Amino acid sequence: MDVKVEVRGAKEFERAVKEVERRFPGEVVKLLDEKAVKLEELIAEDSENQGIVKTGKLKDSYKHFPPEKKGGEYTVTVDSKVPYAHLIEEGHELVLYRPKKKDGGKAHHLGRVKGYFPVENAVDKMNDTYDEDIEKWIYDLLDKNINW
């Protein structure tokens, strides 16, 4: 027994996305740039809400690279240059090393520092409304520039 599932409107929406990419590449780059800036703001906000901001160096370190087209898709990357960003994001093990004279230089595991996940939380928050935002943006752009 075959089951056929058809989503109405999906093909039209897919064609609309391709049409926007083809006719308005500058608008796509502009939107991705805006979304990357919004993600940076959400990361900083989440860091402050969790109380992990001391000097503000980590909070202000998240920057995005200009959007570019790779493999037929537009991408934008948000990254941090702070060397300890991954430790705050994912957590880490606390290890104390004793001098070799006392106990042979063994490592003593003191525990684990929990991860705060500011990037993951910001991405989740952005994803809550991302699809609706993109759909609205596409249809607004098409309504302004294409005669239906």
Image (cartoon, helix red, strand yellow):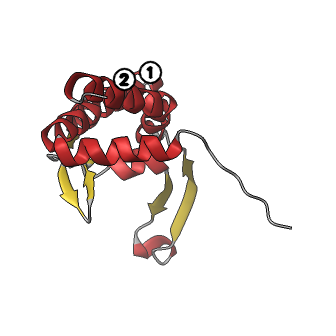
Tag on residue 90? none
**Residue 34, quarter of the rendered image:** top left
Q: Position of residue 70 (x, y in %)?
A: 23, 62
Image spot of residue 3 (x, y percent): 78, 60
Above or below for 97 versus 52: below
Q: Which image quadrant for residue 29?
A: top left
* Residue 128 picture location, percent across and down: 51, 30
Which dot marks residue 45?
2
Q: Is residue 100 left or right of residue 60?
A: right
For the residue labelled by badge 1, is the local secondary structure a helix, a strand or a loop?
A: helix
Amino acid type of the residue that numbered disc 1 sits on in the rendered structure: Asn
For the point 24% across and 46% down, the residue is 21
Task: Locate the N terminus and report the quarter of the image it occupies.
Answer: bottom right
- In three-dimensional space, the C-alpha distance between marks 1 and 2, rounded to whole angstroms, equals 6 Å
User: In the shown orientation, is residue 106 left or right of residue 141?
Assistant: right
Q: Position of residue 100 (x, y in %)?
A: 41, 75
Q: Residue under circle 1?
A: 49
Tell me the residue at 32%/27% (across/down).
137
The amino acid type of the residue labelled 2 equals Glu
Could you classify mark 1 by the number of other residues whose Cα lies within 10 Å: few (under 14), some (14-19), or many (20 or more)?
Answer: few
Q: Nearer the viewer, mark 1 or mark 2?
A: 2
Tell me the residue at 29%/23% (across/down). Answer: 143
Residue occupying the point 47% across, 26% down: 50
User: Is residue 44 visible in this depiction of the protein?
Assistant: no
Q: Is residue 71 above or below residue 47?
A: below
Within-10-Å neighbours for mark 2: few <14, some 14–19, many 20+: some
Callout 1 touching callout 2 (CB < 8 Å): yes
Relative to 117, 31 lies left or right:
left
Q: Is residue 103 among the parts visible in the rendering?
A: yes
